[in-house]
Amino acid sequence: MAAGTMTDNSMLRQAAALTVALNGLDASVVRVEVDCARGLPCFNIVGLPEACVRESRTRVRAALRHLGIELNEHAVTVNLAPADLKKSGSAFDVAIACAVLGALGVIPKEALEGVIMLGELSISGEVSGVRGVLPALLGRGSERRKSAIVPRANAAEARSIAGLRVHVAEHILEVAGHFRGKTLPDAKDVPREASVTLPDAADFAEVRGQFAARRALEVAAAGHHNVLMIGPPGTGKTMLARRLPSILPPMTEDEALEVTAIHSVAGLLSASHGLVEQRPFRAPHHTVSAAALLGGGSTVRPGEMTLAHHGCLFLDELLEFQRHVIDGMRQPLEEGRVTIARARYSATFPSRPLFVAAVNPCPCGYHGTTGVRACRCTAEKVARYRSRLSGPILDRIDLHVGLAPVSLDDLAGETLGESSAAIRQRVSAARERQRARFVERATSTPYNGELSGIDLDRVASLCAASKRLIERAMSRMGLSARAYVRIRRVSRTLADLRGDDQVRTEDVAEAIAARALDRDADAVQLAS
């Protein structure tokens, strides 16, 4: 009796295809298993699919109808394995459709083996672009596959993939034909679309005066140090910050791949955009939420701190941000990554931007200034305003620089400041020295701003006079252990800018002076 009830293996209508699920930037290969049986018509998707994935059944049904295939007589079951991995997004459509076609015998099921498929289907069968193609194909497991099929709209970023043959398609009919012997075009053969020409970055030559601030930003760019600028309105804080990318060296290929992968997941890449070659500059408004700044949401997306990875994150009017939003930056600034934890899973995004912030000395903006406007704020109001910047956040900022109002002589003068190109040469030379130490295994990181205590003992040893100077500063200014480490990091960068292997006492003195907010907020307001 048992043998009589068993189904003949030749009648089984099953097939499997491969696709990729993203959790943040982490990619996992997903096996799409399809069973098509005769019976009451239904289309079920299991394996922890979110709503967008469940809706795939409607898009797949309609798209297959354009191939002359009706599923009215079939009970279709789709299993997304591994079943305990959460699936989100619309990139599963093409793989599901091809697995159904394989189960029905329209295409050879053997041809599906080893081919990763990504793409959203319209109800007319067109293959639409999706987020995260680059990180999906760069993820673990993808490199062992023989080829991939992605939407033509994602060809620009897909051509950056090395070691995997990537085909592009515009319609499910083309995909089906590919598995029946017709070859799809390679992503590398798709003509590049004309990209939008970006205007040249603003130049430091346009900045008048503010030599202390210019010096601080040069040091920040050379060693990847965080900066806080404090001064009244109109002193050029925003102008200076927006020119910071112009003195940073070009991104390496690995950095460009990382940034492009992040922007791909965030949906910020256009059809004509391949690798992101310019360092990102992000300047969110002070009304930004914690999820928008750090990352999160119902479907986890990278926040501004991650979108600024390998670039600049500028928070203008820092003290106008909500206190809990600012404090949420503590761990990312220290560890260089953001971890978004949920009940069933967690996602980790890289977050190593060059952090720059600007604040006013008080709510009206003119506390401590002379010859401009009289401050209308009471001492209590000023203290309450400054208390929004917590000690732990201030501790994580390497350089504090004050800006005074620019004099009329500087504004009306015909002499331009030093150009960004000239500053960038010094910054690039300093970074090359850091990278050389990293390659020689003298340090664990290529940036001075991230050196550990052990690294500093090897490459930034202090003479007796420098040690005494730091001891006095820690005693008088009440500096923390973290501030001590950051002073040594900045000292190492100052020596690199000078082209010196040895950290000198004057480097330590300048690094200590750059932490004046630890001593007295009023002490930096009139610096120039």
Image (cartoon, helix red, strand yellow):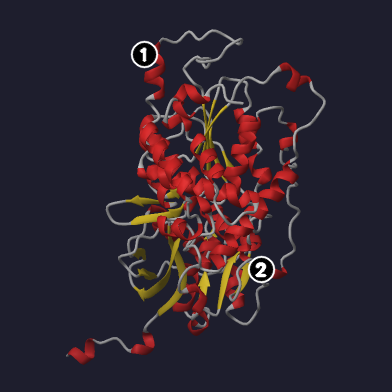
* Alpha carbon distance from label 1 to label 2: 63 Å
Compared across the picture, whether 379 is left or right of 63 comes to: left
Residue type, mark 2 in image: Ala
**Residue 187 marker:** 2
Determine which quarter of the picture holds residue 453.
bottom left
**Residue 259 marker:** none
Where does the C terminus fall, quadrant-wise?
top right
Q: Position of residue 114 (x, y in %)?
A: 50, 80
Mark 2, other Cα within 10 Å: few <14 / some 14–19 / many ≥20: many
Q: Dot 1 lies on which element?
A: helix
Image label count:
2
| Vertical comparison of 417 with 250: above or below | above
Residue type, mark 1 in image: Glu
Q: Is 102 or 364 nearer to us in this picture?
A: 364
Answer yes or no: is residue 249 visible.
no
Answer yes or no: is residue 441 visible.
yes
Q: Position of residue 216 (x, y in %)?
A: 59, 38
Residue appearing at x 62%, y 32% in the figure: 212
Q: Which residue is mark 1?
A: 380
| Vertical comparison of 187 with 393: above or below | below
Nearer to us of marks 1 and 2 is: 1
Earlier-in-chain disc, 1 versus 2? 2
